[in-house]
Image: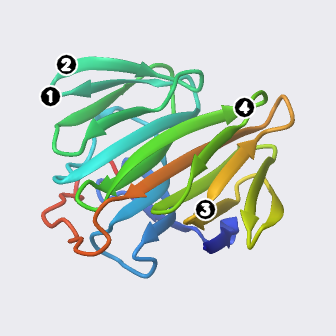
Amino acid sequence: MGMRLLAPDRYRRMPWRNGRGMTTELAREPEDGMGNFLWRISISEVSRQGPFSLFPGYDRLVAVIEGEGMDLLLDGSLVERLSCKTEPYTFSGDRLAECRLIGGMIRDFNLIVDRHYGRATLHRIRKGPGLTVGGLGSVVLIYAVSGEAWIRFREQDEEQRIRLEEEYTLILEGVQVEITCPAAESEAIVSEVSIVGRANYHICVGAIEDNTLP
């Protein structure tokens, strides 16, 4: 089992190349990579409508975590209205995507995965029944949006409990995990990447990142 706890001062904040906003990268694999990646989680600040980046060979999952929301268009057609109340949305990075803001700036959580390496899911957790994910061959990434989240798992036949503070990220690999948010104002975003190609994965090439939204 592998585990990493990331504090906010470990995140990398960077401007978009087109000057439209800022992105905060929480984590990626490879951890020290600067180019293409197997998976990446980040938070974007979207202050104006416009195109998203093309990521050929990748799947994208997005959830609005602050603001009134956005309309997501794929290949010029409206497919979904996303807000803090809606479930995360999944789409192919090969498609031409753009957003239209509903009422001002938003922040959204993004998970991008090389589909040759893994399959991904994204969940929004609030007070109520917990969520159980993970296991052998999977990576679980938990980000505490607001309040705190409790994470429970077993290591060497002993139960482990971790309190994840607001804006912290916990990464667990190869273990089944239960996540709960105990307070009414608590919220967490849970990403799971089920690895399908560890032995012979390749990093996708040709992802276009300049002059578009991240």
Query: Do the CB atoms of the residues marked 1 and 2 lie less than 8 Å apart?
Result: yes
Q: Quadrant of residue 140?
A: bottom right
Q: Position of residue 198 (x, y in %)?
A: 32, 71
Q: Nearer the viewer, mark 1 or mark 4?
A: 4
Residue 51 in view in this figure: no
Residue depicted at 17% across the width and 38% down the height: 95
* Amino acid under disc 1: Asp
Q: Nearer the viewer, mark 3 or mark 1?
A: 3
* Amino acid under disc 2: Ser
Ranked by sequence position, the earlier of labels 1 and 4 is 1
Residue depicted at 55% across the width and 37% down the height: 123
Dot 3: within a 10 Å radius of its alpha carbon, few (fewer than 14), some, or many (20 or more) residues? some
Dot 4: within a 10 Å radius of its alpha carbon, few (fewer than 14), some, or many (20 or more) residues? many
Give the residue at mark 4: 126
> Distance of mark 2 from mark 4, alpha carbons?
31 Å
> Distance of mark 3 from mark 4, alpha carbons?
22 Å
Give the residue at mark 1: 75
The residue lying toward the viewer, choosing from 142 and 7, is 142
> Is residue 160 shown above or below 133?
below
Quick one: SS at disc 1? loop
Ranked by sequence position, the earlier of labels 2 and 3 is 2
Ranked by sequence position, the earlier of labels 3 and 4 is 4
Ranked by sequence position, the earlier of labels 3 and 1 is 1
> Is residue 58 shown above or below 74?
below
Query: Do the CB atoms of the residues marked 3 and 4 lie less than 8 Å apart?
Result: no
* Amino acid under disc 3: Val
Residue 35: numbered disc: none
Q: Quadrant of residue 121?
A: top left
> Distance of mark 1 from mark 4, alpha carbons?
32 Å
Give the residue at mark 2: 77
